[in-house]
């Protein structure tokens, strides 16, 4: 197995303390490779980086329209949110539109990742619920799709809970739709891909980075997708651009970057060092994986890639690509730094 | 720059999701190399993995004896503790022996890393203090050394605070002693090594893994150290073995492993994926660095190395080397696994 190049270094003082290797694919909607660093054919679990792809059936099926989902709700369906009150209320609102509650969610209970929110809950003696799980919006979308797919049966008197129960299983009709959307967008039959169980209990499939990048190029342009998926991708990107807080939260990379760049850049982090992005104006999709799974390096690499492709010296992106590290007394002790292979991307894009 | 080998893999389902490269040195007190994986000459910031070395002057100077430091207090001086009540009380007790309080500490304020402890404090409306900082014991030891070094001046009427203030600076007499102990134990003049600022604001010096391993072989055997440092190393190892809770805390690797193995194994984690260890019965020292800085991989690698060298199939060590990963619903989703280069160590040791 070949080694991937170092993409991000961590400096302490003037010396390199740690190194993050990884692979990066940038392709257009025809599949033509713009950039390939490292092994972009090796299967990678994309985890939450493909939530937009997993939400395509929610919109394409008509479920989102039937239940009148708002921009905020659609953005939350693509989110790994921080469990802040707005996220929790929005997920609860989606379920209320179905006549359901948090009991319908099968993502498990997770405390908010946003520390002040967590501490506020602890101070008030509150407990976490599945609504606080970072995937609660995605799962509310799955439940919404389940209810919509079951409309006929529901009209015949069956309760919604009977259709939604077990929706996280690979063989459930909802998850079959989600897997089919992943296969269609990436061009890979995910049923034949290495399979694992994600943090939120749904299946996750290991796919080549170049196929993931292709999927996001397609979602950014509509090319290569069915008409329904193309419209759904456009609708979801617009929703996230309109409500970027919902996709992450306070001080989160995806939220801040999409607040700044709007529809010019859709990006989404996944666990274990994955990032996917679409840059519609350039017709490009991006997928990267930090080999060791570090989020700090995935964010730094994504920021460097976005800055290079958008030809910007934006200070927000630079703040992530060259993140300052401070210690317990607030002293600057080091920083992250993209390596020349990433820094040289601007030239490659020129 | 050559790439280090993959030492630990992260599995999701049956597929490798993430990979951690790193380097490992195992040497004896003469400097003879037992095992070298990857680049063991490249300088590495050892961070908290060398707290035992940094505590040598506390004992060798006579300060520990003069102030009547207990096993628990000496173990805390070598600790990266979780900020639990026993750790906080012990650090406060050390300072009280000097007539000082938490105000003397220059490590900065840090919330306890032990989550239930943190939540209990939040629920009670308590705030973190420098005593909760994982380094508060080490710093209390530095302050103790400062007071002892200043005994003459104190007898002349100067207040202790005047000697302790600024003890984190490289040029302070205390830090000079600490740096000299590091140089003596590792055989490297740290004043000429790459320098950074540690999380607790003292200098940290980048040193080759083989030199760090040598230092711990020396601390395990006494060979190659001055008589004072040899006695101090023995005293500190005995203290940690007698009070292993102090060096880490509830459910912490170092605490659990030293509770199980006593004086057979001294080990200490450092930030950014470093581990150092001494195995006195084998006359060996160990130093490893995970390139990307991941603690999960450093613990897995250290557990695999310890099991191989001690020729044990101990379930505690195996629980770390093959750590099970569970998701928010408690489902098994994957595990860590040492690669054959680590798993093959037993043979190399035979």
Image (tube, coloured by chain):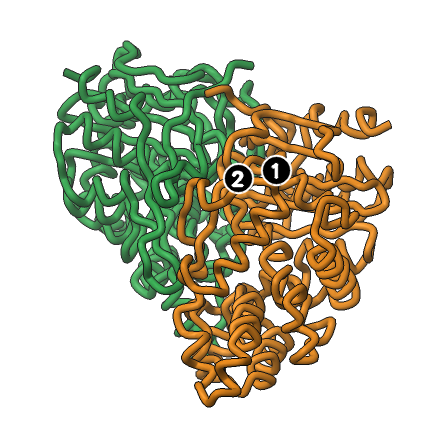
Chain colours: A orange, B green
- Along the line of sight, the residue nearer the viewer: A160 or B147: A160
Neighbour tally class for label 1: few under 14, some 14-19, many 20 plus, Cα within 10 Å: many
What label sits on residue B271 in the rendered view? Answer: none
Give x and y (percent) for residue B98.
38, 55
What residue do we see at 76% from left, 45% from top? A223
Under circle 1, the secondary element is helix
What residue do we see at 19% from left, 32% from top? B307
What residue do we see at 50% from left, 78% from top? A121
Q: Chain of mark 1?
A: A
- Along the line of sight, the residue nearer the viewer: B294 or A76: A76
Q: Is residue B235 visible?
A: yes
Q: Is residue B284 left or right of residue B183?
A: left
Q: Quadrant of residue B274?
A: top left
Q: Chain of mark 2?
A: A
Give x and y (percent) for residue B230.
24, 26
What residue do we see at 69% from left, 42% from top? A302
Spatial separation of the CA atoms under disc 1 and disc 2: 7 Å
Q: How many marks?
A: 2
What label sits on residue A207 in the rendered view? Answer: 2
Mark 1–mark 2 CB contact (< 8 Å): yes
Q: Is residue B96 visible?
A: no
Q: Is residue B189 left or right of residue B275?
A: right
The residue tagged 1 is A211
Q: Is residue B53 left or right of residue A192?
A: left
Under circle 2, the secondary element is strand
Placement of B224 over or under B83, stated as above or below: above
Give x and y (percent) for residue A338.
68, 32
In which quadrant is the C terminus of chain A drawn? top right
Give x and y (percent) for residue A222.
77, 50
Q: Quadrant of residue A296?
A: top right
């Amino acid at each position: 197995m070949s080694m991937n190049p170092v993409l991000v270094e961590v400096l302490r003082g003037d010396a390199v303390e740690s190194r993050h290797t990884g692979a990066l694919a940038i392709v257009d909607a025809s599949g033509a490779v713009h950039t390939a660093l490292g092994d972009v054919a090796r299967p990678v679990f994309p985890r939450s980086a493909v939530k937009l792809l997993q939400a395509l059936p929610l919109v394409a099926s008509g479920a989102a329209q039937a239940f009148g989902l708002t921009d905020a709700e659609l953005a939350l369906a693509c989110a790994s949110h921080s469990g802040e009150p707005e996220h929790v209320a929005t997920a609860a609102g989606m379920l209320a539109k179905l006549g359901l509650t948090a009991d319908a969610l099968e993502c498990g209970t997770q405390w908010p990742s946003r520390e002040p929110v967590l501490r506020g809950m602890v101070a008030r003696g509150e407990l976490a619920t599945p609504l606080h799980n970072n995937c609660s919006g995605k799962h509310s979308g799955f439940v919404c799709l389940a209810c919509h797919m079951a409309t006929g049966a529901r009209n015949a008197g069956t309760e919604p809970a009977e259709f939604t129960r077990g929706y996280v299983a690979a063989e459930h009709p909802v998850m079959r739709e989600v897997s089919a959307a992943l296969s269609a967008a990436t061009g890979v039959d995910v049923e034949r891909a290495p399979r694992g169980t994600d943090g939120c209990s749904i299946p996750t499939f290991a796919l080549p980075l170049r196929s993931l990048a292709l999927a996001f190029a397609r979602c950014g342009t509509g090319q290569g997708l069915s008409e329904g998926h193309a419209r759904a991708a456009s609708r979801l990107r617009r929703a996230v651009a309109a409500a970027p807080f919902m996709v992450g939260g306070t001080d989160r990379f995806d939220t801040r970057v999409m607040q700044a760049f709007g529809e010019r850049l859709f990006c989404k982090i996944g666990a274990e060092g994955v990032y996917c992005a679409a840059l519609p104006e350039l017709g490009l999709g991006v997928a990267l994986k930090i080999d060791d799974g570090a989020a700090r390096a995935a964010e730094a690499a994504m920021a460097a890639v976005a800055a290079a492709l958008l030809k910007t010296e934006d200070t927000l992106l630079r703040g992530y690509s060259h993140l300052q590290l401070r210690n317990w007394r607030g002293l600057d002790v080091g920083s992250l730094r993209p390596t020349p292979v990433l820094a040289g991307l601007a030239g490659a894009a020129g």
